[in-house]
Image (cartoon, grey):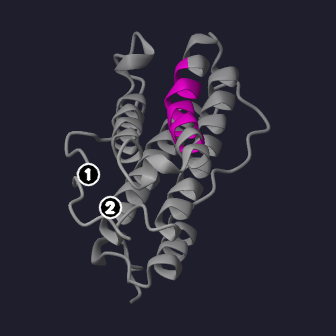
Amino acid sequence: MRRTNSRRFQIPSNHKRCIMAGVRVFTDLRCWQRAREWSKAIFRFTRDAPFNSDRRLVVQINDSSESVMANIAEGFGRGTQGEFITFLGYSIGSLNETQSHLVAAYDREYLTQEDYGRLFQEGTEIRKQIVALITSMVKPGSGVKHLRKARNWSDEVWEMYERITGQERPELYRKKSE
């Protein structure tokens, strides 16, 4: 049974790009702040029925969503740009894992289509911020070598969203050629 009285998750409007200017501690990073809000939103869904009866999925999705922000924090604290970039990559992996768990939650009818779409999209937006942060650190002369080109996940993510939900992506995210 799909949730009918869902708490709507709103994408924060004050989150722009995740940049390093003026950042003194990891909690200053906008991508960490946004990952924290996303993790809290996911937790709110997992504590209510019917989601909370699936203990294994609850633990997995909460752990992976918390891991997104934890890896950002750990990488920031490592002290080197290369290690920070590595841990930002780990945070993207945890984010992908969380989105996979969101798909499972939707398939098991723990989330409405709307809640699933909003949570999934927020993960995609956080990924964009993390990739932007990585890109901002990998400039000529930055000393970072052998970094794979950042992958553009947007089309792949939206195609998966359309397949799973059976609905088109919002107009804002449609290809320009359409």
Q: Amino acid at mark 1?
A: Phe
Q: Looking at the rendering, which quadrant does residue 41 occupy?
A: top left
Within-10-Å neighbours for mark 1: few <14, some 14–19, many 20+: some
- Residue corresponding to mark 2: 115
Q: Which residue is mark 1?
A: 9
SS label for mark 2: helix
Q: Position of residue 163 (x, y in %)?
A: 52, 81
Relative height, residue 108 to residue 62 (above, below): below
How many discs appear?
Answer: 2
Magenta-drawn segment? 60-73
For the residues labelled 1 and 2, say whether their Cβ atoms are less than 8 Å apart: yes
Most common SS among magenta residues: helix
* Position of residue 13 measured from the top left corner of the image (x, y, whole percent): 20, 46
Q: Mark 2 belongs to which amino acid?
A: Asp
Q: Residue at x 22, y 52 (%)?
A: 7
The residue sitting at 62% across, 10% down in the picture is 79
Residue situated furthest bottom in the rendering:
178
Q: Is residue 153 above or below residue 65?
A: below
Q: Is residue 112 left or right of residue 126?
A: left
Mark 1 and mark 2: span between their CA atoms?
A: 7 Å
